[in-house]
Amino acid sequence: MSALSESAELNVWCEDGSLVWFEGSELVHHPIDDPAGAADRIAARYRHPESSQEGHSPTNSVREPTV
């Protein structure tokens, strides 16, 4: 497993061919072959945290609700 921790609020890791991180309480999987897309999504969240929760669906990212 590989992990990138930029801050206490962001940890990104690789899992089963995906880049994975939490957005709030939701686990996000993004294709590992699109690191620029993942970076764009993460950057958008930190620029506009309230607007990135709903209505933003970058290419092939999947959110999984956590329990």
Image (tube, rainbow, N blue to C red):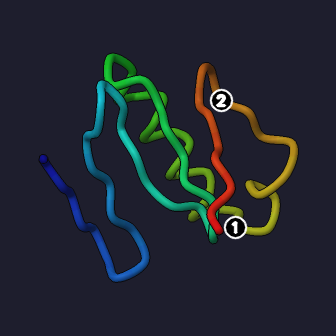
Horizontal arrangement in the rendering, residue 19 relative to residue 37 (left or right):
left
Residue, x 63% and y 60% (percent of image)? 26
Write the residue at 63% across / 70% down. Answer: 24
Marks 1 and 2: CB-CB under 8 Å?
A: no
The image shows residue 31, relative to residue 30, as above or below, that is above
Query: Which amino acid does the dot numbered 2 rest on?
Result: Pro
SS for dot 2: loop
Q: What is the tally of numbered marks visible in this picture?
A: 2
Which numbered marker is on residue 20? none
Label 2: which residue? 58
Could you tell me how far apart the alpha carbons at marks 1 and 2 are, in whole angstroms?
Answer: 15 Å
Query: Residue 51: x, y in percent?
Result: 81, 58
On screen, residue 30 versus residue 16, left or right, reads right
Mark positioned earlier in the residue sequence (1 or 2): 1
Crowd class of label 2 (few under 14; some 14 to 19; many from 20; radius 10 Å): few
Q: Is residue 44 above or below residue 60?
A: below
Q: Tell me the amino acid under the disc marked 1.
A: Pro
**Among all residues in the image, which is located at the extreme bottom?**
8
Residue furthest to the left: 1
Q: Left or right of 59: which side holds 52?
A: right
Residue 67: where, in percent of width, then height?
65, 68
For residue 49, which numbered disc appears in the image? 1
The picture places residue 29, in percent across and down from the top left corner, at: 49, 38
In which quarter of the view is residue 39 placed?
Answer: top left
User: Left or right of 5: which side holds 45?
Assistant: right
Q: Secondary structure at mark 1?
A: helix
